[in-house]
Each structure stands twice: as C-alpha cells, then as structure tokens.
Amino acid sequence: MFERLTTREETLIFTLSTALTMERTVLAMLAEFEEHAQRDDLRKLFRRHTEETRSHVANVEKSFQLLGEDVVGTESPAIDGLREESLAAIRRADGSVLDAVIAAGVVETEHHEIGVYESLVTKADARGAEKVVRLLAQNLRQEQAALEEAKAIEKGIERDGMAFSV
C-alpha cells in the first residue's frame, strides 16, 4: 500500500483498507463468540451481526471501486488486539461469567468499529464521495444498533448476576 501517507486521499484509502481487515477479523470473532456464548440472545445477536458484517465487507469493497482504487486490506493492529484480549478473557472465564466476558468484548469491539466508520464517513463526505458516504453510513448505523443491543444484553447479564441490590 502506501509507504507514507502524504495526502488526505491516501489517509481515506488507508483507513478503508484497515476497515476491510477489521470487518474480516470481526467475522472470525463473531463465530468465536457464538461458539462460546451460553445465552440465546447473545447467539442471536452474533448470527444477525454476522450477516450484517458480510454486507459491511461488501460495502467497503464497493467503496474502493467507487473511489477507483484496488480492493486491498491492510493490517489492523487495533482489531487484532481487541480479538486477542477477548479470547484471553474467554479462556480465563469461569462458565458463570463467560457471557458477561463475551458481551464486554462485543461492546468494546463495536465502539472501535463505530469510531472507524465515523472517521471514514467524515473523510468521504469531505471529498464529496456521496455514494461512498451512503455505504459507509449504512455500516455505521448497523454498528451503532449492534452496540446498543450488546449493551442491553450486557446490562441484563450483569443484573442477573447480582446477588444483592443497592
């Protein structure tokens, strides 16, 4: 890709490239989370968000095409770190807290994805790439909805686990 980022257009393409890798990694994470999840509401979220994430990959790929660029993924250390942290927590989690650990990992990951898409939408909008903005804004809305659902599930898990009320 780029040895150095010297233009704003290059930063858009670079961030789009990391987003592609991010979404591909999230597909693997969702499968891993679903495999370990005990609650039906979590598994449903993962199945639905897997389908959405596949469309996110397609939207990012289409954005490359609309911008006249080759579809290329670039390493995404942030998502790799989130995945590794989540998997480490899952390995350490007792069955009684496993869903809480998974839900927390989902919330953290969704926050990252939202930040990436907010930046991409801003960059694409500044360049007048309206079709790209529409595709990436769709991804952003779905990530925001997934975050809200994950937070609600996490809150329910935490409340269910409370042995006392304050």
Image (tube, rainbow, N blue to C red):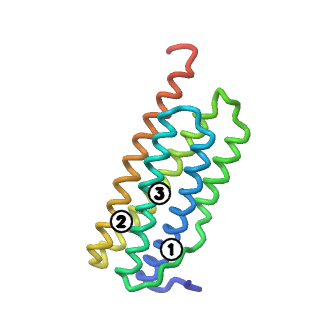
Q: Residues within 10 Å of mark 2 (few under 14, many from 20)?
A: many
Picture quarter with the N terminus: bottom right
Q: Position of residue 41 (x, y in %)?
A: 47, 34
Alpha carbon separation for disc pair 3 and 2: 11 Å
Q: Circle 3: is it few (<14), some (14-19), or many (20+) Cα within 10 Å?
A: many
The residue at the point 61 percent across, 53 percent down is 82
Quarter of the figure with residue 75: bottom right
Mark linked to residue 113: 3
Badge 1 crowding class, 10 Å Cα cut-off, few under 14, some 14 to 19, many 20 or more, is: many
Q: Amino acid at mark 1?
A: Ser
Q: Earlier in the sequence, mark 1 or mark 2?
A: 1
CA gap, disc 1 and disc 2: 13 Å
Amino acid type of the residue that numbered disc 2 sits on in the rendered structure = Leu
Q: Which mark is residue 17?
A: 1
Q: CA distance from mark 3 to mark 1?
A: 13 Å
The image position of residue 108, as x and y in percent, is 53, 48
Q: Amino acid type of disc 3?
A: Glu
Q: Position of residue 11 (x, y in %)?
A: 46, 78
Q: Is residue 22 above or below residue 36?
A: below
Q: Earlier in the sequence, mark 3 or mark 2?
A: 3
Q: How far across and how far down the image is residue 126, in percent?
A: 30, 75
Residue at 57%, 43% in the rendered image: 34
Per the image, label 3 sits on a secondary structure element best described as helix
Label 2 belongs to which residue?
A: 136
Give the residue drawn at x 42%, y 70%. 60
Q: Tell me the SS state at disc 2.
A: helix
